[in-house]
Image: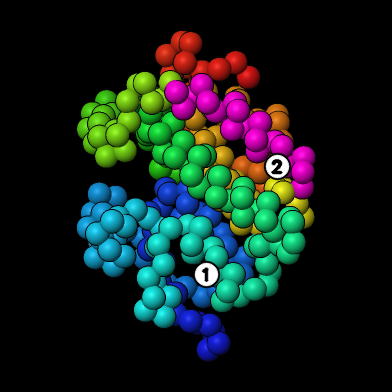
């Protein structure tokens, strides 16, 4: 760790897209950090111990004994620690980046949980493909285990079929907004900004759902998903969601 930077302890879950956004910022700024990957499920109690009873989700970072919770708050704190390269441009563009980052956190980020886990309910054997690139689907015994895990996750995230159908129906309008940000120069510039990381990390995980990938690819939103984030392992096959739930591309 550099003598001029504070000590950063980063608490995360490996599959989490908000955590991917924060880790991308840490690497972009060249900051040293201690990476603490928590166990799903058990992370709730641990996060509450560190960040407070109402803050049980990841990511979190303890920066010189100061707990900072949530991806956007951490991105802003990292900018104060290491202003270059900047994640927040000056002037009107900077204002648009903050607006897009907040929208990505509030409106788009939840779909990165609901749609992948929702699709796995219908194709639980596909959970095996998320273990590594080119990993095969699960065998029957593994699928039985995945079904139990997926049921628990649906309960934890309060997923329902109605919510999934609504999220899918509303996705094209959200992708149109991402495309508009690209057209306006807010996203997908030469250097990533905070909105690129917040929105791109969510789109990257959404592309693991075949039905959703078909809606993203071939439009400007695809470059936001792929430009700053490696291709994630895992793919839930096209057709996982019931007929009529997925809007036409």
The reply to whether residue 113 is in sight is yes
Residue 101: percent from left, percent from top: 58, 51
What range is drawn magenta here? 166-185
Q: Is residue 227 above or below residue 141?
A: below
Q: Quadrant of residue 125?
A: top left
Q: Is residue 140 above or below residue 79?
A: above
Q: Quadrant of residue 75?
A: bottom right
Foreground residue, 88 or 129? 88
Residue 169: percent from left, percent from top: 51, 21
Residue at image coords 70%, 42%: 181
Q: Which mark is residue 181?
A: 2
Was residue 175 drawn as part of the magenta stretch in this picture? yes
Q: Is residue 174 above or below residue 93?
A: above
Q: Secondary structure at mark 2?
A: helix
Q: Main secondary structure of the magenta part?
A: helix
Left or right of 217 in this view: 15: left
Foreground residue, 13 or 44? 44
Was residue 108 drawn as part of the magenta stretch in this picture? no
């Amino acid at each position: 760790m550099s003598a001029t930077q504070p000590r950063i302890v980063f608490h995360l879950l490996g599959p989490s897209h908000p955590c991917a956004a924060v880790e991308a910022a840490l690497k972009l700024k060249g900051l040293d950090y201690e990476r603490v990957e928590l166990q799903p499920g058990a992370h709730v109690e641990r996060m509450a111990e560190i960040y407070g009873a109402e803050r049980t989700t990841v990511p979190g970072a303890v920066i010189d004994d100061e707990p900072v919770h949530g991806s956007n708050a951490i991105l802003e704190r990292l900018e104060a620690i290491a202003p270059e390269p900047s994640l927040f441009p000056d002037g009107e563009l900077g204002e648009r980046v903050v607006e897009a980052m907040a929208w990505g956190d509030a409106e788009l980020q939840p779909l990165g949980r609901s749609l992948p886990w929702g699709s796995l309910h219908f194709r639980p054997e596909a959970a095996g493909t998320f273990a590594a690139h080119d990993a095969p689907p699960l065998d029957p015994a593994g699928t039985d285990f995945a079904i139990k895990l997926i049921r628990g996750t649906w309960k934890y995230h309060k997923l329902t079929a109605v919510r999934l159908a609504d999220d899918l129906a509303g996705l094209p309008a959200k992708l149109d907004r991402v495309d508009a940000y690209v057209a306006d120069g807010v996203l997908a510039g030469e250097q990533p900004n905070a909105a690129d990381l917040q929105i791109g990390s969510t789109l990257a995980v959404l592309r693991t759902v075949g039905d959703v990938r078909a809606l993203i690819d071939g439009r400007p939103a695809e470059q936001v998903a792929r430009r700053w984030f490696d291709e994630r392992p895992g793919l839930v096959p096209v057709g996982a969601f019931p007929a009529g739930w997925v809007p036409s591309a």
